[in-house]
């Protein structure tokens, strides 16, 4: 029961962090959270959290401008975010 509450609280925090200053970023990160979070590995979840910690201009470079991320796990999450 405590794990379920902790998971729900984390998901709520992540949803809030998905609210960005750019609508395009909102859509991409929220879609990944809703679609892929439940099945994501711990490495993918950590990479997603790291992406959410970035400032919008840096996140936009990776998600909208095609800049490659140096970390393979994070690059994989970015690739999945960009898939429709």
Image: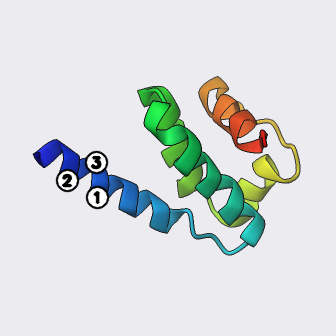
Q: Residues within 10 Å of mark 2 (few under 14, many from 20)?
A: few
* Residue shown at 80% from the left, 36% from the top: 68
User: Is residue 33 left or right of 79 when viewed as pictured?
Assistant: left
Which residue carries the number 3 mark? 7
Which secondary structure, mark 1?
Answer: helix
> Of residues 8 and 42, which is closer to you in this image?
8
* Residue shown at 78% from the left, 39% from the top: 83
* Residue shown at 49% from the left, 47% from the top: 49
Which secondary structure, mark 2?
Answer: helix
- CA–CA distance between discs 2 and 3? 5 Å
Residue 22: x percent and y percent? 73, 72
Residue 46 makes an appearance in the image: no
- CA–CA distance between discs 1 and 3? 5 Å
The quarter of the image holding the C terminus is top right
Asked if labels 3 and 1 touch by Cβ distance under 8 angstroms, the answer is: yes
Q: Is residue 12 above or below residue 84?
A: below
Q: Which mark is residue 9?
A: 1
Residue 80: x percent and y percent? 70, 35
Asked if labels 1 and 2 touch by Cβ distance under 8 angstroms, the answer is: yes
Residue 14: x percent and y percent? 44, 58
Which secondary structure, mark 3?
Answer: helix
Which residue carries the number 2 mark? 5
User: Is residue 83 left or right of 38 when viewed as pictured?
Assistant: right
């Amino acid at each position: 029961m405590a794990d379920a509450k902790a998971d729900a609280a984390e998901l709520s925090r992540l949803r809030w962090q998905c609210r960005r200053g750019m609508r395009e970023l909102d859509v991409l990160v929220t879609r990944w959270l809703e679609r892929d979070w439940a099945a994501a590995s711990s490495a993918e979840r950590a990479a997603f959290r790291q992406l959410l910690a970035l400032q919008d201009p840096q996140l936009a470079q990776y998600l909208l401008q095609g800049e490659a991320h140096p970390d393979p796990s994070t690059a994989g999450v970015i690739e999945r975010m960009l898939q429709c």
